[in-house]
Image (tube, grey):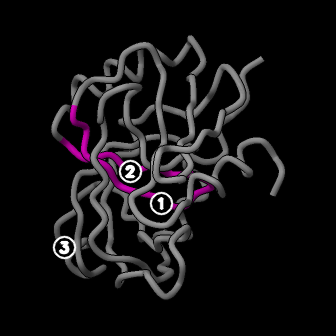
């Protein structure tokens, strides 16, 4: 039986870079970020990335605004917050077929491999094909975890999660398998 994926960060396709991380600035808590608790864990279409809440509110239209707090980066390495507008109707829920698997790359950093449930494979393919070249926001537990650019369609429902900065995949793996 598939389990809801409780966390996800830094996706790429197996064997090829799929989603390019674009980390520029980090976060503070905002009222809109707290209101995101109703969002399912998933990959959402990012409709804009803004340096201030005022800029986001002025430009985002009907989009939801989430604050990127860079929650997995060490506090000393966090840049200032950024505000990401998302389309809450354009997303792929995180539901996986098998337990996530952690391995190490040649530099000793954790790589997290995930296989989405077969019921969500086609949805992921359609989403990444339709939004090729656009940004996605990874939302887990109502919080924006990371933002990535879709570099190619994801087919087969298999993702590799790699780190843009700190070795956050180790933390994510423990959350996914329930050992934290």
User: Nearer the N terminus, badge 1 or badge 2?
Assistant: 2
Compared with residue 28, is residue 159 higher up or lower down, i.e. above or below? above
Q: Quadrant of residue 40?
A: top right
Give how far apart the Cα atoms at labels 1 and 3 are.
Answer: 20 Å
In this orientation, which residue lies closer to the viewer: 63 or 178?
A: 178
Quadrant (top left/top right/bottom left/bottom right) for the C terminus: bottom right
Give how far apart the Cα atoms at labels 1 and 2 are.
Answer: 7 Å
Q: Nearer the viewer, mark 3 or mark 2?
A: 2
Q: Please, what secondary structure does the residue beneath circle 2 have?
A: strand
Give how far apart the Cα atoms at labels 3 and 2 are.
Answer: 20 Å
For disc 1, the neighbor class at 10 Å (few under 14, some 14 to 19, many from 20) is many
Task: Indicate left or right for 136 with 144 as reference.
Answer: left
Q: Are marks 3 and 2 in contact (CB under 8 Å)?
A: no
Residue appearing at x 55%, y 67% in the figure = 72
Identify the magenta region: 134-151
User: Nearer the N terminus, badge 1 or badge 3?
Assistant: 3
Residue 144 lies in magenta, yes or no? yes
């Amino acid at each position: 039986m598939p389990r809801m994926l409780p966390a996800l960060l830094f996706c790429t396709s197996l064997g090829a870079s799929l989603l390019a991380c674009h980390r520029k600035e980090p976060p503070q808590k905002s009222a809109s970020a707290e209101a995101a608790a109703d969002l399912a864990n998933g990959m959402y279409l990012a409709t804009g990335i803004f340096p201030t809440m005022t800029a986001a509110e002025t430009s985002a239209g009907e989009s939801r605004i989430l604050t990127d707090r860079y929650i997995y980066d060490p506090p000393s390495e966090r840049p200032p917050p950024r505000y990401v507008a998302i389309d809450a109707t354009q997303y792929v829920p995180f539901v996986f077929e098998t337990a996530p698997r952690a391995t190490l790359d040649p530099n000793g950093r954790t790589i997290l491999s995930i296989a989405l449930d077969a019921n969500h494979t086609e949805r992921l393919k359609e989403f990444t094909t339709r939004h090729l070249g656009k940004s996605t926001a990874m939302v887990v537990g109502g919080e924006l975890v990371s933002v990535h650019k879709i570099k190619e369609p994801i087919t087969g429902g298999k993702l590799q999660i790699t780190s843009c900065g700190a070795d956050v995949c180790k933390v994510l793996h423990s959350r996914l398998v329930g050992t934290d």
